[in-house]
């Protein structure tokens, strides 16, 4: 179960000096058909041992996850390479640049960087000169700055062109993406965040409010919430192994908030994750954090308190803890689409996957 990952690209002076001739267009998610509701399990053999053939589902879930992550990484790398080749071919055709039998023009050859002006170089130098060595000058840094700005422009133009090719259907990958293993579990009494009666797709999030990676994953996914809810019913299963922790209290709150309606549940999850970011998981001010989330979510406090203190609510979270343990989840968010594990949890990729699985 992969964590939500985010990449930061430095564009200040300290980043100059590392240039790559290979561009990395934004990674798509082509969405395997197996994520569609009711799609059959693909259990084709992956190896034979002692005259017995093993399929993916014959292996422990932890091993399935490990193999899936490896396959996803390989697929992503291959996809980026394929995109680059297709993009270069398309741009070469558009610019009437010859393609020989032995070579496709590079991005540097296709985009000459002639749009980088001296004023752009001077402006960049002035904005970043504090990051440069004390002995650096505009004259000595100009070549590196020019190269840096060229690459930024090329990246921007290439991403725009790649998006255009995909949106118009001119580019379609034929690579087969990996498909997550099927995981059966009972979601009875779990808080539904968003539900559309006519949607068969079900997106399930399993996480601990006390987990920093889970908070980042949830808040990232919430940025595309409206679009996700157009494609899938969204259910959140909150767990927390430590019953004395803030995470356990917020998990109980999730169940109680959901009983007051989807809108309240959505407000609770966001408020609860933000509350958990401010407090330690073992903070002595658990009560204050919960009350703050109740207030921010505009919940009916009397109804909430009664639910929060009930044995039934605590038992639901204990059931979730057991589920998390069976899934080998620890300090991470699991994302399942139609009960299939999704390795890549970038918000835009999840969104694309839910669209293709409808």
Image: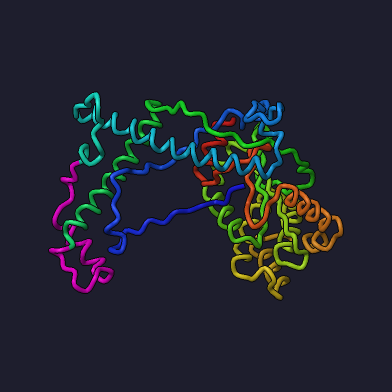
Q: Is residue 229 visible?
A: no
Q: Is residue 327 visible?
A: yes
Q: Is residue 277 left or right of residue 146?
A: right
> Picture quarter containing residue 113?
top left
> Picture quarter containing residue 132?
bottom left
Residue 116 magenta: yes
- The residue stretch that appears in magenta: 112-140
In the foreground, 180 or 201? 180
Q: Position of residue 287 (x, y in %)?
A: 73, 71
- Residue at figure coordinates x 24%, y 53% from the top left: 149
In the foreground, 275 or 19? 19
- Residue at figure coordinates x 52%, y 32% from the top left: 177
Q: Position of residue 137 (x, y in %)?
A: 16, 68
Residue 337 magenta: no
In the foreground, 298 or 284? 284
In the foreground, 75 or 212? 75
Q: Residue at the bottom extreme?
A: 284
Q: Is residue 272 left or right of residue 303?
A: left
Q: Residue at the top extreme?
A: 101
Q: Residue at the right extreme?
A: 311
Q: Position of residue 25 (x, y in %)?
A: 37, 41
**What color scheme is it?**
rainbow
Q: Position of residue 265 (x, y in %)?
A: 68, 53
């Amino acid at each position: 179960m992969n964590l939500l990952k985010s990449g930061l690209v430095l564009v200040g002076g300290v980043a100059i000096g590392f240039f790559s001739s290979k561009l990395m267009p934004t990674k798509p998610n082509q969405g395997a058909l197996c994520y569609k509701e009711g799609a059959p399990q693909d259990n084709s053999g992956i190896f034979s041992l002692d005259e017995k053939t093993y399929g993916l589902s014959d292996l422990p879930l932890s091993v399935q996850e490990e193999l899936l992550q490896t396959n996803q990484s390989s697929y992503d790398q291959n996809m980026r390479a394929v995109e680059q080749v297709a993009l270069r071919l398309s741009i070469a055709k558009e610019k009437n640049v010859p393609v020989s039998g032995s070579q496709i023009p590079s991005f540097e050859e296709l985009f000459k960087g002639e749009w980088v002006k001296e004023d752009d170089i001077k402006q960049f130098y002035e904005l970043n000169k504090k990051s440069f060595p004390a002995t650096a000058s505009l004259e000595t840094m100009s070549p590196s700055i020019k190269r840096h700005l060229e690459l930024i422009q090329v990246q921007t133009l290439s991403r725009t062109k790649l998006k255009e090719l995909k949106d118009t259907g001119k580019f379609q990958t034929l690579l087969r993406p990996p498909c997550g293993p099927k995981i059966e579990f009972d979601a009875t009494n779990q808080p539904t965040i968003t539900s559309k009666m006519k949607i068969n797709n079900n997106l399930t999030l399993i996480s601990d409010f006390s987990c920093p990676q889970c908070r980042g994953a949830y808040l990232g996914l919430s940025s595309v919430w409206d679009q996700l809810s157009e494609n899938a019913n969204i259910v959140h299963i909150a767990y927390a192994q430590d019953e004395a922790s803030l995470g356990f209290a917020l998990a109980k709150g999730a169940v109680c908030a959901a009983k007051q309606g989807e809108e309240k549940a959505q407000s609770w999850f966001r408020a609860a994750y933000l509350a958990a970011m401010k407090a330690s998981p073992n903070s002595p001010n658990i009560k204050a954090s919960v009350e703050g989330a109740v207030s921010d979510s505009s919940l009916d406090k009397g109804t909430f308190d009664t639910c929060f203190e009930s044995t039934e609510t605590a038992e639901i979270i204990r059931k979730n803890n057991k589920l998390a343990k069976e899934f080998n989840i620890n300090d991470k968010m699991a994302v399942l689409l139609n009960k299939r594990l999704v390795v890549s949890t970038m918000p835009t990729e999840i969104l694309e996957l839910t669209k293709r699985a409808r």
